[in-house]
Image: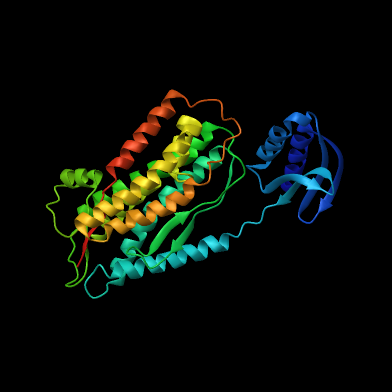
């Protein structure tokens, strides 16, 4: 028996354990099961169980109706890894080109160092999510990096999760793992960068706002101020992204974590935070006029859109988190606060 055949048989057994199957037919790329639920009043939970059965495998499971009959379909999942690779290469190029401008005479070698630092920080964040999802048997993609001509050459990276979340613990673990792994990477990169010498270009550059965590690292390394090495800037970027992602809104990482911690009460917080960001943006712009305020206004509008959609509930939404995870969640939000600066960009030279 091949691995593919064995996998199909395992999924069939799980479906038959939860449903009365009266017919099975082949469809392109998979099978269609015609079913009757054992308990018609509990069909949604049984469908969820059938989906869970295939999460850690190579098939997508969907449930619905076909010509008036209840069906469950399993289809071979097609992964297009080449898309991840192409986007990674494109992001490497874009971050290298941007990083080269941080050096005199457009130093490509220096740009490569900056690019690798940024990709290490962003990649660590996303792989934290990836491995946490795999640990819970969830279907998830490899990171999709997003090349874009920003001040760092990218809009970050994302991964796609498929299927329902089994419980609050899984939701919490997947949500918190990315920021925690990412901030460790950012701290390492910042330490390295602050110990490197850098001669900035004669023209251009940014004056950045320093978050508390970055300031603590400058104190620990004895950094005396002035221009920082682009590698240290990559660490700063990691901290800034952590602060953005840990905002307790919608399906941001912070939204996942808070939803797991306090349940549906998090929806009220999710609606308040975007308004606070927009107000913060106006206050910063009025008092400083550096453009930093527009960052928060834009992010406030984006998160306002996120907050309009209720966070999907895990299958088991009743069992609360254990004490260790609650404490870890509080620690994660404290770390995010230490990564926050109200004025990320103070001046453009």
Left of 302 or right of it: where is 8?
A: right
The chosen color scheme is rainbow
Q: Position of residue 108 (x, y in %)?
A: 31, 71
Q: Among all residues in the image, which is located at the extreme right?
A: 22
**Residue 255, above or below 150:** above
Q: Residue at x 45, y 37 (%)?
A: 268
Foreground residue among 61 and 257: 257
Q: Position of residue 16 (x, y in %)?
A: 79, 34
**Residue 282, above or below 70:** below
Q: In what quadrant of the picture does the C terminus appear?
A: bottom left
Q: In what quadrant of the picture does the N terminus appear?
A: top right
Q: Among all residues in the image, which is located at the extreme bottom?
A: 105
Quarter of the rendering containing residue 41: top right
Q: Residue at x 68, y 40 (%)?
A: 51
Left of 123 or right of it: where is 69?
A: right
**Residue 86, above or below 299:** below
Q: Residue at x 47, y 38 (%)?
A: 267
Q: Does residue 3 appear anywhere in the picture? A: yes
**Residue 233, above or below 340:** below
Left of 209 or right of it: where is 324?
A: right
Q: Does residue 181 appear anywhere in the picture? A: no
Q: How many callouts does the rendering have?
A: 0
Q: Position of residue 189 (x, y in %)?
A: 29, 51
Q: Residue at x 62, y 56 (%)?
A: 79
Q: Position of residue 173 (x, y in %)?
A: 48, 36
């Amino acid at each position: 028996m091949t691995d593919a055949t064995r996998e199909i048989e395992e999924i069939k057994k799980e479906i038959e354990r939860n449903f009365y199957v009266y017919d099975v037919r082949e469809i392109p790329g998979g099978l269609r099961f015609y079913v009757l639920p054992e308990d018609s009043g509990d069909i949604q939970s049984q469908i969820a169980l059938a989906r869970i059965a295939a999460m850690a495998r190579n098939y997508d499971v969907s449930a619905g109706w076909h010509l008036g009959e209840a069906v469950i379909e399993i289809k071979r999942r097609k992964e297009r890894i080449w898309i991840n690779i192409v986007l990674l290469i494109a992001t490497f190029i874009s971050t290298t080109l941007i990083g080269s401008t941080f050096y005199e005479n457009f130093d490509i070698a220096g740009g490569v160092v900056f690019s690798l630092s940024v990709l290490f920080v962003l990649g660590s964040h996303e792989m934290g999510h990836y491995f946490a999802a795999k640990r819970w048997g969830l279907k998830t993609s490899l990171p999709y990096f997003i090349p874009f001509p920003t001040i760092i050459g990218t809009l970050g990276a994302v991964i796609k999760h498929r299927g329902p979340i089994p419980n609050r613990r899984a939701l919490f673990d997947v949500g918190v793992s990315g920021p925690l792994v990412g901030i460790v990477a950012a701290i390492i990169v910042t330490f390295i960068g602050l110990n490197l010498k850098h001669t900035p270009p004669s023209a251009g550059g940014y004056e950045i706002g320093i978050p508390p965590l970055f300031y603590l690292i400058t104190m620990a390394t004895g950094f005396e101020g002035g221009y920082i090495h682009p590698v240290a800037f990559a660490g700063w970027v990691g901290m800034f992204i952590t602060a953005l992602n840990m905002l307790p809104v919608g399906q941001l990482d912070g939204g996942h974590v808070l939803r797991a911690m306090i349940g549906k009460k998090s929806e009220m917080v999710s609606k308040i935070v975007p308004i606070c960001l927009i107000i913060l943006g106006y206050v910063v712009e009025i008092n400083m006029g550096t453009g930093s305020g527009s960052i928060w206004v834009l992010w406030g509008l984006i998160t306002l859109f996120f907050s309009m959609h209720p966070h999907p509930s895990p299958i088991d939404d009743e069992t609360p988190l254990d004490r260790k995870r609650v404490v870890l969640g509080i620690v994660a939000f404290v770390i995010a606060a230490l990564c926050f600066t109200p004025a990320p960009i103070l001046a453009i030279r």
